[in-house]
Image (cartoon, rainbow, N blue to C red):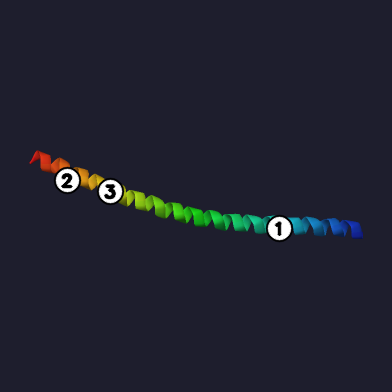
Amino acid sequence: MSIELFNRLEQKVTSAVEALELLKMEAEELREENSRLKQEREEWERRLTAVLGKLDELDGDGQG
């Protein structure tokens, strides 16, 4: 194998490794964002359930 071919191969491998590292970092950021969004959604669900519960109480009071 000529040195030129070896250098090109080495450059391609290096580029692939760098791209893989960037993808790993992006995946970790997306996992963190997903976790944050899940927590936010759960909080909104709790708040909505509480509001709906209060509305049900008001509706029940008016019918009695």
Circle 2 is placed at which residue position? 57
Residue 23 placement, left or right of 31: right
Q: Position of residue 43 (x, y in %)?
A: 35, 53
Front residue of 15 and 52: 52
Label 1 and label 3: CA atoms lie apart by 46 Å
Amino acid type, callout 1: Glu
Amino acid type, callout 2: Glu
- Badge 1, how many Cα within 10 Å: few under 14, some, many 20+? few
Front residue of 13 and 62: 62
Circle 1 is placed at which residue position? 18
Callout 3: helix, strand or loop? helix
Callout 2: helix, strand or loop? helix
Residue 2 placement, left or right of 20: right
Give the residue furthest to the top. 63
Circle 3 is placed at which residue position? 49
Label 2 and label 1: CA atoms lie apart by 59 Å
Q: Earlier in the sequence, mark 3 or mark 2?
A: 3
Amino acid type, callout 3: Thr
Callout 1: helix, strand or loop? helix
Residue in view at x 69 percent, y 55 percent: 19
- Badge 2, how many Cα within 10 Å: few under 14, some, many 20+? few
Instruction: Locate residue 58: give its quadrant.
Output: top left
Residue in view at x 80 percent, y 57 percent: 11
The quarter of the picture where the C terminus appears is: top left
Let me know if residue 1 appears in the view: no
Q: Position of residue 63 (x, y in %)?
A: 10, 39
Q: Earlier in the sequence, mark 1 or mark 3?
A: 1
Residue 56 placement, left or right of 39: left
- Badge 3, how many Cα within 10 Å: few under 14, some, many 20+? few
Residue in view at x 45 percent, y 55 percent: 36
Let me know if residue 15 appears in the view: yes
The quarter of the picture where the N terminus appears is: bottom right
